[in-house]
Image (cartoon, helix red, strand yellow):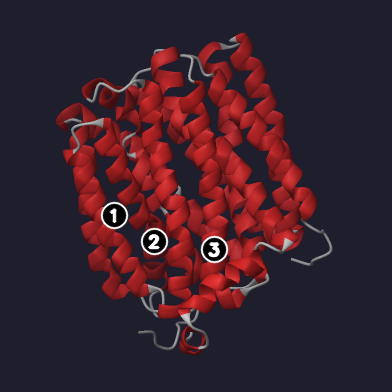
Amino acid sequence: MSSTPISPPAAHPLRLLGILSVLMGFAAISTDFYLPAMPTMSQALQAPGGEMAWTISGYLVGFSFSQLIWGPVSDHYGRRLPIALGLVLFTLGSAGCALADSITTLIAFRILQAIGACANVVIARAMVRDLYHGHRAAQMLSTLMTVTAITPLLAPLIGGQILAFWGWRAIFVSLVCVGIIMLGSLIFLPETLPKRTEQSHSVLHAFSHYAHLIRRPRLIGYAGAGGCYYAGTFAYISGSPFAYISYHHASSLLYALLFGMGIIGIMTANMINARLVRTWGSDRLLVMGTIISVLVSLWLMIDVWTDFGGIWGMFLPLFLFVAMAGFIVANSLSGALHDDPGHAGTVSAMTGAVHYGSGIIGSGMVGLLTDGTPRPMATTIGVGSLLSLAFLLLIRQDRKD
């Protein structure tokens, strides 16, 4: 289906940037819209807070493992068709969530929603690698993530307003509309996979490449470092509504504002990363971000376990931890994609599966250990940060970025 790929200086670079940014933001769109509604949904569906956390874990199950299919398929058949199929599944899953009458049904449709959403995320990352190389790829990923970060910044605020005026089901109806709009935008999205790459191997060969990837310690180091950070991030996403709203009695509006501040931190760190990556190197910035995440997560654990500073004692280290995504995510992805441009979709899929698979563990632990306090969230974040730093030992520092 593919034709000759576009080059970075395309005729409409801003339009392409905008479409890729939204596609990469589908993971955040799918979850952050309904975060302020989780306590309300818990009451409406008669599901305890721990069970509501499984709506995020269930989403991560679908998102993580279906990437392993979308990546090789996009390496063989091109980028546009799998994205279109993913958008259809996302739209159907969102409609199912809007109609759900039990927590079990909601989780099932969240999984379908995730299977569709992950096609957009994993393939959009591969498209960046189709177009850019080396430190320029890391720079572009940081730029795209800065733009993408606007979505989780606004999503809880918009979701909170939709909740207040029309109820929680309307939040998922709005996601149906997003899916339909993005399907229409695909007429402006060019194919970026070179035709010769699509036809060089069978699709089964593309899947078999996973066996080669898991034997590369450097790749495992990048994927594991990012994955353990994601475990902490999704512990934050699934635990923060109850930590702020239920435990500290914050309003849904205040929660949305505090959550949005973390997104501003990510955007700021991404902009700094894009400026420094050429001179500092992506590996050095990755290590720096990981070390800072360890220090602030230990600070968070102390404040939460002693209740020092109340809501603000919890917010400050959480803000700094979340902001480190600007240094950890783009650089770990760029490092993983660097050495195998011919299988960018497969590498992106495996790395994403590790990231979001770790997120399953992070959000699942919050649900499993829930005790009505922020302690399970803080502890999971601390353990994830330490493991992230440990995985960096697998990365040799002799490559020039």
The image position of residue 55, as x and y in percent, is: 36, 36
Q: What's the distance in space between the residues labelled 3 and 2, CA to CA?
A: 12 Å
The image position of residue 296, as x and y in percent, is: 67, 29
**Is residue 338 visible to the viewer in this orientation of the structure?**
yes
The residue to which callout 2 is attached is 120
Q: Residue at x 38, y 52 (%)?
A: 26
Type of residue at label 3? Ser
Looking at the image, is mark 1 or mark 3 earlier in the sequence?
1
The residue sitting at the right extreme is 398
The residue to which callout 1 is attached is 90
| Residue 61 circle label | none
- Quadrant of the rendered structure where residue 190 is? bottom left
- Quarter of the picture containing the N terminus is bottom left
The residue to which callout 3 is attached is 348
**Is residue 150 visible to the viewer in this orientation of the structure?**
no
Q: What's the distance in space between the residues labelled 1 and 3, CA to CA?
A: 20 Å
Identify which residue, 29 or 259, lies in the foreground: 29
Type of residue at label 1? Phe
Left or right, 86 with reference to 91: right
Looking at the image, is mark 1 or mark 2 earlier in the sequence?
1
Type of residue at label 2? Asn
SS type, badge 1: helix
Q: What's the distance in space between the residues labelled 1 and 2, CA to CA?
A: 10 Å
Looking at the image, residue 167 lies above or below residue 68 = above
The image position of residue 34, as x and y in percent, is: 31, 35
Do tag 1 and tag 2 residues touch (Cβ < 8 Å)? Answer: yes
Q: Residue at x 35, y 67 (%)?
A: 83
SS type, badge 3: helix
